[in-house]
Amino acid sequence: MLERSWPAEGATRVPYWVYQDEDIYREEQRRIFLGPAWNYLGLEAELAEPGSYITTFVGEMPVVVTRDMQGELHAFENRCAHRGALIAMHARGRAERFNCIYHNWTYDHAGNLTHVAFRKGIGGKGGMASDAKPESQAPKKLRVEALHGIVFGTLSESTPPLAQYIGPQILPRLARVMIKPVKLLGTYTQVLPNNWKLYMDNVKDTYHASLLHVFFTRFRINRLTQKGGVFVSADGAHHCTYTEMVEDRGDAYEAGGMRSAGGAHDFRLEAPELLEQVDELGDNVAIQILSLFPGFVLHQIRNSLATRQVVPKGIDRTELHWTLFGFADDDEAMLRRRLLQANLVGPAGYISMEDGAATGFVQRGVAASPDRASVIEMGGAAIGSGDSRVTETAVRGLWKAWRSYMQV
Amino acid sequence: MSGTDFELRLQVEELHARYAHALDNDELERWPEFFTANGRYRITTAENEARGLPLPVLYAEGHGMLRDRVASLRHANIYEPQRYRHMVSNVLVEADGAGVKSVATFLVVRIMENGEAMLFASGRYVDRISRGEMRYEERVVICDSRRFDTLLAIPL
């Protein structure tokens, strides 16, 4: 059991030890990532061909995701039954079978051990005894489900079916983005100097977006005064926030003296075509950020579409694997638009470069105060959907779900 | 190598050097001037290039977009004070009709305000240069690694 107690205030406080303790980090691997949660594995478009595979992570577990010759998706631990070496060492590829390089043990696309080199020895000498059971240490297999072109896996038999796990509040918001076959545009990794949960906190924090990200506010891309809202799943685990395309002409930020409004400095883009949006999804939404517990984000920022996979690499290090995509039927103008709007996101993103800095500041700021806690009281103590984004309701949802998994 | 080729090589190396010094000296406002009026600047990764995937980490075409990037870094984006130190070497130069092609390798060390320094990026500059103006018509920055630490604020 974890010897930790939560502050008496409950949902409105998050103690800083959650970002610092090695014990917590280890338990999260077991109870969350390897437990009853669906983890993002990749896009179906990355596994288009029979025999193709990608390698990724579920928490710290290395995982191979495959499409077999019959077209079926599989995922299994990237660990040989013999000595534990990686079975697949490349990021992606096509393979008829997987041979561990160490001693050439062989696996099929489902992760079944199909051949042990020299199992019966050579010339009647050496080899394994007839009752040896190398399969007893076989790589763990994941249950795999693909939904709207996105592939997820879970290591637990008790995880509910994926659609049920995501729930009726969030699933339609995921479906509204994934309307057509996807075309991969590219990938990169942003290394964040903080605990993985600080990034998820940040993603779910609708209150910060227009205050930290000045680019948003100066150009009136996203202000809390614009029409929008937030959806939170019943268990608090997943969230979705959106902003409509209507231009905000109010002056709440200027009147409030917010740094992000820019004061007297009149900041205008010389090349505003960077931001021109075509309403390709047909519902007048400019920005939608969706997250699924524990570490998946899907964004639509104007015509920029991407998944982000949160991969923990220690208590104070997180990798964010970005995969930007368009649709298979994009014309040249749409492709150009998506590539221009790639400037908004990623490590050099006009509106996302600050996230890594801000979450790193928290990791450093709380270094000596595991006994103190975040104050998360915007919007009161409630956890639920609403039409205001001046709230931390989705952040409280994250911690409700986390505490339920971790039993603290 | 003829005298003309030698002179061209010196001009290209001088351009690369002035570009690196401008960024390392925090003279970001001068950065757009290293490009022709319609010049293109793109940062990508060797992995995306090898896969034929078009995704840029950063992309700008023309002085307007280049100046927007600088204005945003100066007035909008929040990032810890930091500097770069560029090392540019192995410069190849090839005259190509009215233009010039150049490939060069780079290392960029990033130095934070607290003194922490790290090897932030390595890769290749693949350039097309206007011979008349001695400015970049296109500068493609192909980073060897797909990983970027925390954020990429200052251009490479």
Image (spheres, coloured by chain):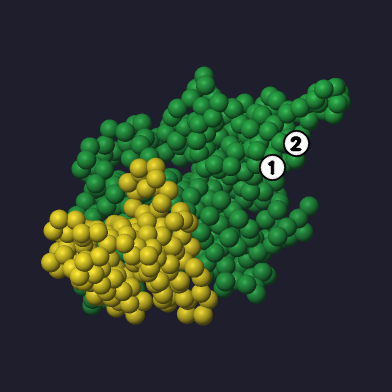
Chain colours: A green, B yellow
Which mark, residue A190? Answer: none
Provide the secondary structure element on which disc 1 rests: loop
Question: Would you say residue A361 is visible in this rendering?
Answer: yes
Depth check, front residue: A247 or B30: B30
Residue at the disc numbered 1: A85
Q: Residue at x 54, y 48 (%)?
A: A295
Q: Residue at x 23, y 55 (%)?
A: A274
Residue B155 placed where, x, y %?
Answer: 34, 67
Quarter that holds the N terminus of chain B: bottom left
Q: Chain of mark 2?
A: A
Is A134 left, or right, of B105 in this rendering? Answer: right
Residue A64 placed where, x, y %?
Answer: 58, 37
Is B49 left, or right, of A368 in this rendering? Answer: left
Please name the amino acid that badge 2 sits on: His
Q: Residue at x 13, y 58 (%)?
A: B98
Please name the amino acid that badge 1 sits on: Ala
Depth check, front residue: A44 or A38: A44
Q: Disc 2 and disc 1: Cα gap in Å?
A: 8 Å
Residue at the disc numbered 2: A82
Is A401 left, or right, of A344 in this rendering? Answer: right
Task: Please tell me how many numbered marks the rendered image carries.
Answer: 2
Q: Quadrant of residue B20?
A: bottom left
Tag 2–tag 1 contact (CB < 8 Å): yes
Provide the secondary structure element on which disc 2 rests: loop
